[in-house]
Amino acid sequence: MNGSDKMTRSEILEALKSPPPGGDYVWDGVSEDDRPLTAEEMRAGKRLGRPPGSNKESTTIRFDKEVLDAFRASGPGWQTRINAALREWLETHPGT
């Protein structure tokens, strides 16, 4: 890299030519659909984002740091687990 924490455009393009072997990328996204694209998928024109027809909605919400730390520490899929916990709460607190 160029000495800073950020890559230049040319460094990014060069990195895309030779991604890490095995396609093993670190990602704590929600699902396979949310993972970063591999270089091959980018060259093939695959699009990011949820599949058509998804009922998920992007939003901004603030949680206590301890809550997020605990869910993130549980590994990949932590956002899905937060969603499940909130859904469970709704089921046990109807009309709230």
Image: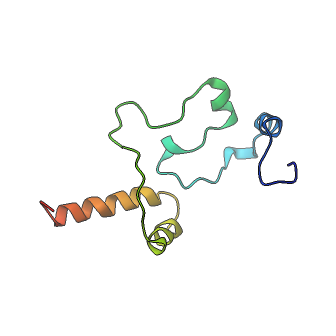
Residue at (36% x, 43% y) in the render: 56
In the image shown, does 90 or 74 lie closer to the viewer?
90
Q: Position of residue 53 (x, y in %)?
A: 34, 32
Is residue 23 rendered to the left or right of residue 53?
A: right
- Vertical arrangement, residue 40 with respect to residue 5, above or below: above
In the image shown, does 10 or 39 lie closer to the viewer?
10
Q: Position of residue 24 (x, y in %)?
A: 67, 49
Q: Quadrant of residue 79?
A: bottom left
Q: Position of residue 27 (x, y in %)?
A: 59, 53
Is residue 88 rendered to the left or right of residue 20?
A: left
**Quadrant into which the C terminus falls:** bottom left
Q: Position of residue 16 (x, y in %)?
A: 76, 36
- Vertical arrangement, residue 58 with respect to residue 71, above or below: above
Is residue 29 rendered to the left or right of residue 55?
A: right
Residue at (54% x, 30% y) in the render: 47
Q: Residue furthest top?
A: 44
